[in-house]
């Protein structure tokens, strides 16, 4: 009986065995690379979430659309447990003397007035706003400003001048002290009876009543979605034996109300 070239008794050819082995090696190599990437991302996540060694400082231009996006960014970062310790407003238009007239002077005044309004809103949101004797925002421990200069700061000397304008004699690494991102408090009962009530508070700078919000209970986790950003919050044991009774938005925080579930309250 005739056989096909390279095939003996139906056995695969050496080339086919080699090709299959190469494919397996490629898959193994890809799996190893993905595993290493996952480990690296986990390490990066742990580093960013370590409040003792890492904080985030946001830089923006004082414009309404940019400020609105910054508020959403601050909320999303807080939702993932990342700490923002300061905001830097760049390219602040300098004030102009009243004696100047013309279209250019009018544009500068209007631009400056709009930027000051944005800075006041950011200062109020971040609870660090302050006005000087002239009524202009001066910033604070969490909000600082950099003036708009004619030339882009390039080089060590120019950047050192920017640093002096920003921080002066203050420590650049000393950002604003933020409160706890998550806290649990008992608001009713003695903590053991079915009449007890608990609140889970999540600090979310920038969140308000217009912010899109969704809550879902998944086993012992609470899925929180804010402006399309989702996070699973692992509930402590006492809240794992409760049901969600309601939620409200406070000042830069989301408060979720829990009450004991009679079917499991005394079982764990």
Image (cartoon, rainbow, N blue to C red):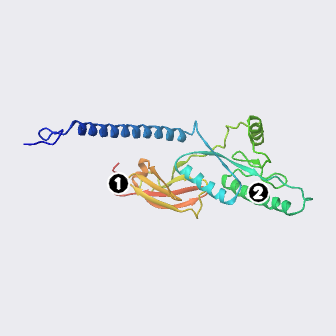
Label 2: which residue?
116
Up-down: is 37 above or below 149?
Answer: above
The residue under the point 44% across, 39% down is 37
Label 1: which residue?
264
Q: Distance between the Cα atoms at labels 2 and 1?
A: 54 Å
Whether residue 192 appears in this view of the structure is no
Would residue 224 be found to the left or right of residue 157 on screen? left
The residue under the point 38% across, 57% down is 261
Q: Residue furthest left?
A: 1
Residue 52: name its quadrant.
Answer: top right
Would residue 169 be found to the left or right of residue 23 on screen? right
Q: Position of residue 196 (x, y in %)?
A: 45, 56
Would residue 208 be found to the left or right of residue 4 on screen? right
Q: Position of residue 70 (x, y in %)?
A: 63, 54
In this view of the protein, which residue sits in the foreground, 91 or 22?
Answer: 22
Q: Quadrant of the N terminus?
A: top left
The residue under the point 50% across, 41% down is 45
Q: Position of residue 184 (x, y in %)?
A: 51, 50
In this view of the protein, which residue sits in the foreground, 7 or 139?
Answer: 7
In this view of the protein, which residue sits in the foreground, 201 or 214?
Answer: 214
Q: What is the crowding at mark 1: few (fewer than 14 residues within 10 Å), some, or many (at least 20)?
A: few
Q: Secondary structure at mark 2?
A: helix
Q: Secondary structure at mark 1?
A: loop
Whether residue 156 appears in this view of the structure is yes
Q: What is the crowding at mark 2: few (fewer than 14 residues within 10 Å), some, or many (at least 20)?
A: many
The residue under the point 85% across, 63% down is 103
Q: Position of residue 149 (x, y in %)?
A: 79, 47
In this view of the protein, which residue sits in the foreground, 150 or 267?
Answer: 150
């Amino acid at each position: 009986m005739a056989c096909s070239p390279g095939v003996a008794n139906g056995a695969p050819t050496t080339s086919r065995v080699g090709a299959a082995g190469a494919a397996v090696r490629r898959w193994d190599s890809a799996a190893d690379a993905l595993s290493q990437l996952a480990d690296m991302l986990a390490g990066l996540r742990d580093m960013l979430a370590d409040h003792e060694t890492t904080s985030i400082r946001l830089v923006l231009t004082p414009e309404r659309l940019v400020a609105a996006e910054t508020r959403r960014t601050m909320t999303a970062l807080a939702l993932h447990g990342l700490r923002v310790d300061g905001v830097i407003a760049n390219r602040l238009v300098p004030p102009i003397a009243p004696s100047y007239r013309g279209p250019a002077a009018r544009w500068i005044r209007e631009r400056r007035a709009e930027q000051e309004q944005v800075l006041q809103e950011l200062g109020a949101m971040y609870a660090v706003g302050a006005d000087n004797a002239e009524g202009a925002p001066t910033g604070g421990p969490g909000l600082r400003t950099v003036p708009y200069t004619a030339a882009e700061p390039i080089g060590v000397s120019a950047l050192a001048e920017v640093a002096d304008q920003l921080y002066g004699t203050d420590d650049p690494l000393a950002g604003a002290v933020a409160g706890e991102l998550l806290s649990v408090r008992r608001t009713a009962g003695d903590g053991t009876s079915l009449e007890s009530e608990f609140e889970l508070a999540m600090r979310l700078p920038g969140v308000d009543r217009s912010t899109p919000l969704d809550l879902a209970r998944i086993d012992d986790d609470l899925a929180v979605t804010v402006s399309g950003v989702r996070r699973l919050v692992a509930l402590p044991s006492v809240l794992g034996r409760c049901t969600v009774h309601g939620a409200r938005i406070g000042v830069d925080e989301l408060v979720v109300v829990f009450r004991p579930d009679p079917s499991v309250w005394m079982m764990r």
